[in-house]
Image (cartoon, helix red, strand yellow):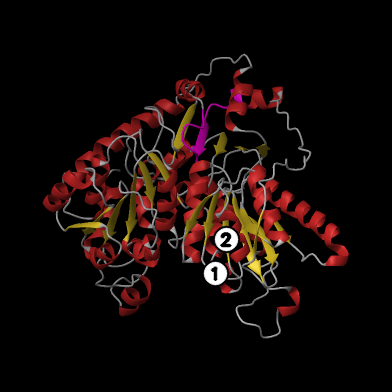
């Protein structure tokens, strides 16, 4: 097997193999040649070549998002590494395992005016879980350096695996960079790192508090599909003292849950808030999209807030009282092991009546409005076939999705760690490359154009679909307070434009269709999911001047 001659590269490649890090996303460069040679000549690894490092970072994140396993990123020295930063921060806050491996100049060539050289150690600061700055091995200290480097690499890979987040391995390579040797494939096991055994039990006091609370609210953020056992979902749904609020990204479904949080909360007044205020709030999953539920719970805090997560807990509502360090199923298993006295409560019944009325008004409102973002989302969501993966762009896209009850066979993902628009398309394509199911990605126009380099790859599946809501600017800013009729607003906030995605579709060999009315959209969707030899892109043009008023009027209508 052909491998690089440099010992540092050999160590990294062997240890990635040992730790079962199979997917390697490489951006072309010279200083990282030893790593590129090693990974691409090894039968174990699946390697992807993505030129744009910012796109590469999110492409790798999409793969890791789906596999729930570490994915490695490999780049050359200099500014290439900095372009990973948006994906690294998203991975950090979304708890997605990425292994960033950056090639570097030897230390004596840094900060002396050498080309393509920056200070790479500590570049990600607090946004990585661990950083391994490796050292070059010289003759006098060769074995000692190899042992030290291997220990650092082992620790980085172990942390990425067990703590689900990004780590950074910085590797100085001297020239020559392209020398190779023929070596036998090594078989070795990673050093054993002692794990702290976390045993979990629920105290009688905690159970008593749970059982005595007549108004329990469960709020679920970003959550992997099929991660909570159906038995526990059924138990929660049958408890009259519980309402379960699920975000679109929670991937949890039950007829008695509350999937459209903003639809429920937006029309409430102060008296309603007092009735809805929980005694006990239980949260699990990742980031919460709904600003309205955040505002409600910060203004009307529960006496008790419990969060379930094996690693960490965010005090999002400023009232966290306890963090249960376990997975969700372990918590509910412990909870169900106690004998519980049946609870008398009207909490679920009261708010379920409200939910039913809201859904009726929702349907009625859709019959009364003209073609718009709101109408387009309704038609799009009704036509997505079963068992698709739905990847969502940020900003207005994910917020519109929150207003609809989605097909429960869909799995839904969105970059909510930092909620940026910068890598949504790249993430969706990365996720699609390893998904068993076909993927549809729904995004806004600014987000799409911002990350258009995402289409510059050779891995986009032919069953990949993109839907762009083109309202010719950042439509979400029209929903927020501010003077929407000024030149400054249209230029610096909404950023008006006349771009279309048709030339980009042609450049990257996507089938392109557009729609500007209800009739055109219905016709376009009829053929959109039919099998094709190329991926497809549907661009929907909506009236930017009307979208905000139609959405704002919606919340008045459903009161």
Q: Secondary structure at mark 1?
A: loop
Between 495 and 530, the residue placed more toward the observer is: 530
In the displayed orientation, state which residue is furthest to the right: 140
Q: Which residues are magenta?
A: 210-228
Give the number of the disc on residue 36. 2
Is the C-beta separation of discs 2 and 1 under 8 Å? Answer: yes
Is residue 381 positioned above or below 228 on the image? below
Examine the structure image and report whether residue 219 is included in the region drawn in magenta: yes
Write down the quadrant of residue 307 in the picture.
Answer: top right
Mark 1, Cα crowd under 10 Å, few <14 / some 14-19 / many 20+, is some
Residue 4 horizontal/vertical position (percent): 65, 60
Residue 222 horizontal/vertical position (percent): 49, 43
Q: Residue at x 70, y 71 (%)?
A: 174
Q: Residue at x 21, y 47 (%)?
A: 528
Residue 18 horizontal/vertical position (percent): 67, 43
Residue at the spot of label 1? 29
């Amino acid at each position: 097997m052909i491998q690089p001659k440099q010992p540092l590269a050999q160590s990294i490649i062997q240890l990635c193999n040992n730790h079962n890090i199979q997917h390697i996303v490489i951006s072309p460069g010279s200083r990282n040649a030893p790593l590129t040679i090693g990974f691409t000549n090894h039968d174990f690894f699946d390697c992807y070549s993505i030129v744009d490092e910012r796109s590469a970072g999110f492409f790798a994140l999409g793969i890791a998002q789906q596999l729930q396993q570490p994915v490695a990123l490999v780049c050359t020295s200099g500014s290439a590494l900095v372009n990973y930063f948006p994906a690294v921060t998203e991975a950090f806050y979304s708890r997605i395992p990425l292994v960033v491996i950056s090639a570097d100049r030897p230390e004596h060539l840094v900060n002396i005016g050498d080309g393509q050289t920056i200070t790479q150690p500590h570049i990600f600061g607090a946004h990585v879980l661990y950083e391994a700055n490796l050292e070059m091995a010289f003759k006098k200290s060769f074995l000692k350096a190899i042992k030290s480097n291997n220990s650092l690499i082992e620790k980085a890979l172990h942390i990425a695996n067990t703590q689900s987040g990004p780590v950074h391995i910085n590797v100085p390579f001297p020239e020559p960079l392209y020398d190779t040797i023929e070596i036998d494939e090594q078989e070795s096991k990673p050093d054993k790192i002692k794990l702290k055994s976390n045993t979990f039990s629920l105290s009688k006091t905690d159970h008593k508090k749970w059982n005595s609370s007549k108004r329990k609210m469960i709020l679920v953020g970003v959550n992997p599909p099929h991660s909570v056992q159906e038995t526990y979902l059924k138990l929660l749904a049958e408890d009259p003292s519980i309402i379960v609020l699920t975000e679109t990204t929670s991937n949890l479904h039950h007829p008695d849950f509350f999937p459209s949080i903003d639809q429920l909360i937006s029309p409430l007044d102060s008296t309603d808030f007092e009735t809805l205020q929980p005694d006990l709030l239980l949260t699990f999953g990742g980031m919460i999209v709904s600003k309205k539920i955040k505002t409600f719970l910060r203004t009307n805090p529960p006496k008790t807030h419990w969060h379930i997560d094996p690693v960490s807990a965010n005090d999002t509502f400023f009232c966290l009282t306890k963090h249960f360090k376990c997975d969700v199923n372990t918590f509910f298993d412990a909870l169900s092991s106690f004998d519980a006295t049946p609870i008398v409560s009207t909490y679920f019944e009261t708010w379920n009546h409200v939910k039913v009325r809201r859904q009726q008004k929702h349907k009625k409102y859709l019959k009364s409005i003209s073609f718009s973002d709101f109408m387009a989302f309704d038609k799009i969501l009704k036509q997505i076939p079963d068992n698709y993966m739905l990847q969502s762009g940020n900003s207005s896209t994910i917020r519109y999705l929150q207003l609809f009850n989605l097909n429960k066979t869909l799995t839904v993902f969105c970059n909510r760690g930092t909620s940026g628009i910068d890598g949504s398309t790249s993430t969706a394509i990365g996720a699609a490359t390893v998904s068993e199911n076909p993927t549809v990605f729904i995004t806004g126009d600014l987000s799409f154009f911002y990350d258009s380099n995402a289409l510059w790859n050779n891995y986009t599946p032919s069953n990949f679909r993109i839907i762009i809501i083109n309202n010719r600017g950042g439509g979400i800013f029209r929903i927020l307070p501010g003077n929407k009729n000024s030149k400054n607003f249209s230029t610096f906030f909404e950023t008006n434009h006349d771009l279309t995605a048709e030339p980009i579709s042609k450049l990257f060999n996507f089938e392109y269709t557009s729609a500007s009315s209800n009739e055109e959209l219905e016709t376009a969707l009829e053929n959109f999911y039919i099998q094709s030899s190329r991926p497809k892109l549907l661009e929907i043009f909506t009236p930017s001047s009307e979208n905000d008023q139609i959405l704002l009027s919606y919340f008045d209508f459903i009161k």
